[in-house]
Amino acid sequence: MEELTKILAACDLSDWARWLFTSTDPDARETQLFLNRAFMHLPPSTQQRETRQLGNADSSNTDAFLHELLVYEVCYEFGLDPDFKPIIDGKTPDLKLKIAGKTYLAEVFRTNRPKKTVIEFNGHPGYRDRGEGAKKIADRLSEKAATYRGLNHALILFVVFAGRTVNTRDLETALYGATVNELSSAGGLNIDCHEEWHRHGVFCPPGPTARHREISAAIGCDWFDTLARNTPERRLHCVVYHHWQPHVAVALGSFGRFQDVCWVGDESGLFIPQISGEPKLVMSTTGNEPKWGSYSADHPW
């Protein structure tokens, strides 16, 4: 039995985590192997510390740990020298990363759709969202920014979509007040920002008076089961959303070929989204070395 699987056998687990670490289904088994490999990449002292903490954790904290471990392993694969839960000036961020010679603190949090938006229609589950999903994300982003404001480090936030009930549209609206496609179609956004009646994003307004400039980027992460029947495994899709004028920028391509959304300001004060990378790229999260490929519902792998 792998080390992490053995540790979790004595822990308080959610239904999802219990299924993941006790099932013999191929998709669960491959994810087990991936997370066990990630755990073994932690230094021995960190493994011992996390083992002690897991023994006292409730199921929600255990779920959070598993998603933090997911992001740790992704950063490990990208060569970002991740440090898991370091203590820095009395704070304990989920990760410390080194990117192009600069140090960043990173936080990981899962989000799902607010319960009050969930409805049932003709016997099928659905939701009625008037911006609540984006607001929930925006509130957590602001909370994380406030926690680490004052430390002499830039911040990267990883937003993991739980259960696929929220997605990149919600995150984009939380950050910029509108989706990237909407802002691109409008020709960008100027320093006067949105109209007064329009809900603003946590990064608004663009330009030197932008809020939360200590956040270099927010990264949306969709960790999902592939539709490919011959490989019942999990895939990870990420998009890197850059602050339009951060104190410390993150170099484009720092997270491989995952898509980057950055902003270019012109002399008139207009900020226009610039998109690079591969929009459909996903990463395999299995017991083997990660694979990369374009993914769609029509062509899953």
Image: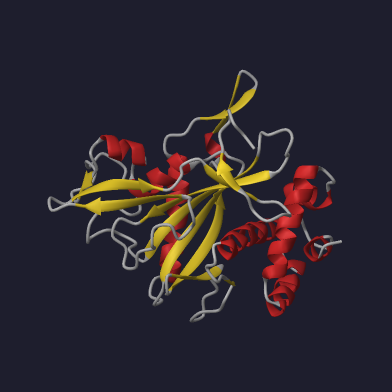
Residue at the spot x=42%, y=74% of the render? 101
Give coordinates of residue 299: x percent, y percent. 59, 31
Give coordinates of residue 41: x percent, y percent. 68, 69
Residue 267 shown left or right of residue 145 in the figure: left
State whether residue 291 is above or below residue 7.
above
- Quarter occupied by the C terminus: top right
Q: Is residue 205 visible?
A: no
Q: Is residue 258 visible?
A: yes
Residue lying at the far left of the rendered structure: 268
- Quarter occupied by the N terminus: bottom right
Q: Nearer the viewer, residue 131 or 35?
A: 35
Residue at the spot x=75%, y=71% of the render? 51
State whether residue 218 is above or below residue 93.
above
State whether residue 164 is above or below residue 96.
above
Judging from the image, the colouring scheme is secondary structure
Residue 82 shown left or right of residue 186 in the figure: right
